[in-house]
Amino acid sequence: MRIIEVRQFGGPDVLTLVDRDIPVPGKGQVVIKVEAIGVNPVDTYIRAGTYPVLPELPYIPGGNAAGTVQSCGEGVTELSQGQRVYTACTFGAYGEYCLCDATQVYDLPEEASFAQGATLGVPGATAWRGLFIRGLGKAGEKVLVHGASGSVGGAALQLGRAAGMEMYGTAGSEQGLKIIDELGAVKSMLHQGDYVDRLRAAVPGGFDLILEMLANVNLETDLSLLAPHGRVVIIGSRGRIEIDPRLTMGKETDIRGLALAAASSVELKQTHAALAAAVRAGVLRPLIAATLPLEDAPRAHQKVLEPGLNGKIILSPGL
């Protein structure tokens, strides 16, 4: 089988296409024949060696894939050969086959394509966790999603709207604004110029919840946009930032971090059950920005960090 392997941390060029034997599942493990791979920003941080927790070298990148069960190891009873599934593992997804712990594999509803399934493990789960678990979002609340045309932001917009929240979104391009509007945002605006003043004018009382994808740029501004007792959930950040802590005091607002790795097994089970239900009900339709062949993993790692990305970058072993 063909896989992408990283033998040393560095730039996108360290992503190397190699041939390996198809893995054999051990106790409690599953091998998936991969049809689609989701490329996430965190994949690039790990590859670069800048993520707090790093794998031993060499390793196969990627935590999101969708396909069919190829084989099951001893003790696996909830999955069967040929079943459509998606993964929410840590590593190993960038290949024609993926070896996973069975607890990291979930049933993929027929209503979703394999490409859409490859967005559920991290982007979908992050959106759900940001809205309902870390963000404590409720019906009727006003929610601002930065980067709402991206894979996490688009999922959050759909899930929040279905739960009765008033959803607002920013984007980096006119195409992104069009997507946000089509997803049912109350209001959308370009993330540039006087957008902060326009947000304040649109929601004078402030936002109850903000989902932040680039905290090192926006966090202090977010604090000024919150309503009393509002929450900012930090989903992404690419560096340090200096803020005035007093901005949190007068309105007793919260800054909350989010990491899927910190989720409990109970939370993960609830999250993926909710995502499956949302897909089956037509509430959640993940956005796909582009599909590239597996060997184009270096280009995918460049594209996933480009501003104005609308939806998920997918690698396809079959192209």
Image: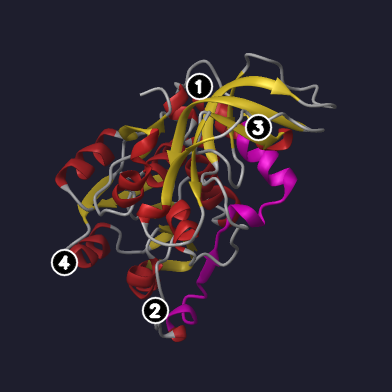
Q: Against 297, is 288 above or below?
A: above
Mark sitting earlier along the chain (4/2): 4
Mark 3 lies on a secondary structure that is: strand
Report the quarter where the C terminus lies.
Answer: top left
Disc 1 marks a residue whose amino acid type is Ala
Tell me how far mark 4 sits from mark 3, CA to CA.
44 Å
For disc 3, the neighbor class at 10 Å (few under 14, some 14 to 19, many from 20) is many
Magenta residues? 247-273
| Label pair 4/3, CB-CB below 8 angstroms | no
Camera-near label (4 vs 2) is 2
Camera-near label (3 vs 2) is 3
- Residue 250 appears anywhere in the view: yes
| Label pair 4/1, CB-CB below 8 angstroms | no
Q: Which mark is residue 281?
A: 1
Q: Label 3 belongs to which residue?
A: 105
Q: Label 4 belongs to which residue?
A: 194
Q: Label 2 belongs to which residue?
A: 241
Camera-near label (2 vs 1) is 2
Tell me how far mark 4 sits from mark 1, CA to CA.
38 Å
Tell me how far mark 4 sits from mark 2, CA to CA.
21 Å
